[in-house]
Amino acid sequence: MSDISKAHPALADALAAKGYETLTPVQDAVLAPELDGVDMLVSAQTGSGKTVAFGLALASTLLEDAERMPRADLPLAVVIAPTRELAMQVKRELDWLYGKAGGKVASCVGGMDMRDERRVLGKGVHIVVGTPGRLCDHIKRGSLDMSELKAVVLDEADEMLKMGFREEIENILGAAPEDRRSLMFSATVPKTIASLAKKYQRNAVRVNTAAEAKQHMDIEYRALRVSKDDRENAIINVLRYYDAKNAIVFCDRRDEVNRMVQRFNNRGFSVVALSGELNQSQRSAALQALRDGRAKVCIATDVAARGLDLPDLELVVHASVPKNTEALLHRSGRTGRAGRKGVSVLIVPHQAARRAERLLQGAKITANWVNPPSAEDVIGKDNERMLEGLVLEDPVTDDERVMAERMLEKFEAGQIAAAFIRQYRAGRSAPEELVSGGGGGNERGGQRERTPRNDFAGGVWFTLNLGRKQKAEPRWILPMLCKSGDLKKGEIGSIKITETATFVEVDPAGLDRFLAAIGPEGKIEKAITARQIDGQPDFNGGHVQGGGGGRGRDRGDRGDRGARDRGGKGRGGDRSESRGRSSKPYAPREKVKSYDDRPPKMNKKAKARAAEAAEGKVENYEEATVWADDPSYADKPKKPHKKKLARAAAKSGKPSGKSSSGKSGGAKGPRGSGGDGPPKRRKAGKPGGVKLKRKPKA
């Protein structure tokens, strides 16, 4: 960093009045002598002072060697920002930076009255700051004349392209003079930004600050493992634990914003919302409430909070894991700005832990994986702040001493201290009780570790009369035993299934209830019965399958499942032996009998006669089979189709139907050749007696 003497003399006084003593790396980089008057493509991290940086870079172009800005007729510079909030923030920064130099700055953003903006532009301004859509509207209506433009600045250029403003940006750049200066500031420089710079910039110089390699060194990252249902409760405890002057909670959708705002308001937090469904006046009121201290928490979406700059923002909470590294860096970059410290907290459900790890690794960020603050942690932090906030160094005045003596005469010291503690905690929301400190996940946020259960002391074994052949599975055997056997889930131990039987271990505590439920016959459900076994059952008689048991069942009973399921021969073992099948080769199939050896085909009457023979109503079956060849029992032949009859008649030249009068003697001649009836008219294009074939579909 360097001192502010490198800045233009007309702006150095404004920097000193604002409290600047040194410049940030990006501000110092753009003031290099070799970059004076050239196009630049600057990439710097969020919160590094880019707004002041391009304000300082424009000074040599707008002021040149003068101490004050020239007369404001037509705009000399245009600054394009992706959102209304960022545009208004840029305007405020340029107001104080160019205020002493006589610079006039106007804003043109969506949601504001265009007539007011047109009147301001008509009076004359030096710098116009606006959003792409509104600037295009003013250019088309002729209220923004860019003929005298000397410089164009694109702030957050990568975000504008993501939001679909490429066409508007190209229209604005196309309306500007060709000899103007172009400055592009972007957190990242993807191919789209590089192509845009190549098209609209002249010999642009790429500027990378040294701080870019150290992303957000002033921000402490913490990843909290929570269960899915405890997400909002964990956010409440985080807000209570840090008690930041200003905090922002990022959500993915508007409905999440509305739900959290309603719940946090009910819990006593001073909350405002910031989403795309708010108009400009509502958004401005929400931001002003945060700056004035009337609100401490802002619930916002990514797009609505783009470029948001709050001086006292100390805490950023990601209610859900960001979708990419750019979103993570942008969200977190709202805090830790201009050398101030901040905390970025990721709320990570267990199922999203791996994705969060990859996200942090891709952003080159090291986060502390911890459990969310518990209710005891929040209360302990409140007690520390209460003791630190006590003012005991100042001397006691006479009025205070008199009141203190009166209170001590009327109350005990413990009562007075308890009343003070209750009053201190009265205006604060009570912390939430979380499920076992965030769900009991392991250190890396994965699934909870499974520990083997201890076997029942003196467990009693029963055998059920069903196995794998009856499709026995632990998933339905376990609830069946609980329902029909009057057992609890924790009273059922190992369930082992063989080919023809199932062995179940029962806790002695539930043995009497189980025996009373199944009765002396051992009936459980339908045809399923249970029989008690003396001692340990022998599982060597059949292939044993480890099944599900009660709570925390011994998964170690399964042993080496891969080797056991394959008969102990590994992956290439004999699968037929492991499945209880015979290892003998398949028997050859019987030869198909010849046509002469097959039984004669019988019609319906013959089949009925054969059935009577089988029942003893006929003397022998051979006699019944003769009926198959008997013409008297033969089925009536099917009548040929009328199309076949017509085709056969056409070939033989004989009539194939009755006359039109319905008499048997009057055969109808060929179509159109006479006969008893009048000749029918032949359809055009179709020769008589010829059937046209339909063309096959392509």
Image (cartoon, helix red, strand yellow):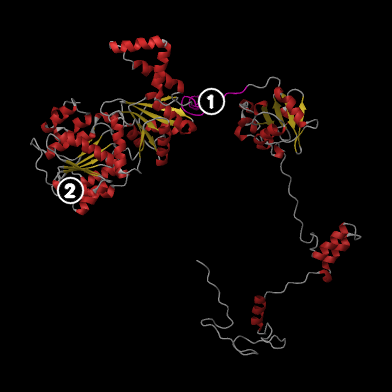
Examine the rendered structure and indicate whether residue 259 appears above or below residue 166: above
Residue at the (61%, 31%) spot, across then down: 562
Residue receiving disc 1:
449
Residue toward you, 510 or 7: 510
Magenta-highlighted stretch: main secondary structure? loop
Q: Quadrant of residue 189?
A: top left
Q: Amino acid at mark 1?
A: Glu
Residue toward you, 45 or 114: 114
Q: Position of residue 252 (x, y in %)?
A: 40, 39
Q: Amino acid at mark 2?
A: Arg
Q: Position of residue 576 (x, y in %)?
A: 68, 37
**Residue 179 shows in this picture:** no
Residue receiving disc 2:
119
Q: Position of residue 682 (x, y in %)?
A: 55, 84
Secondary structure beneath disc 1? loop
Residue 632 appears left or right of 687: right
How many numbered circles does the render carry?
2
**Residue 337 shows in this picture:** yes
Magenta region includes residue 445: yes
Measured Cα–Cα span from mark 1 to mark 2: 68 Å
Tell me which segment is drawn in magenta.
434-453
Query: Dot 2, crowdedness within 10 Å: few (<14), some or many (≥20)?
Result: few
Examine the rendered structure and indicate whether residue 645 appears above or below residue 617: below
* Residue that extends furthest to the left in the rendered view of this protein: 66
Magenta region includes residue 658: no
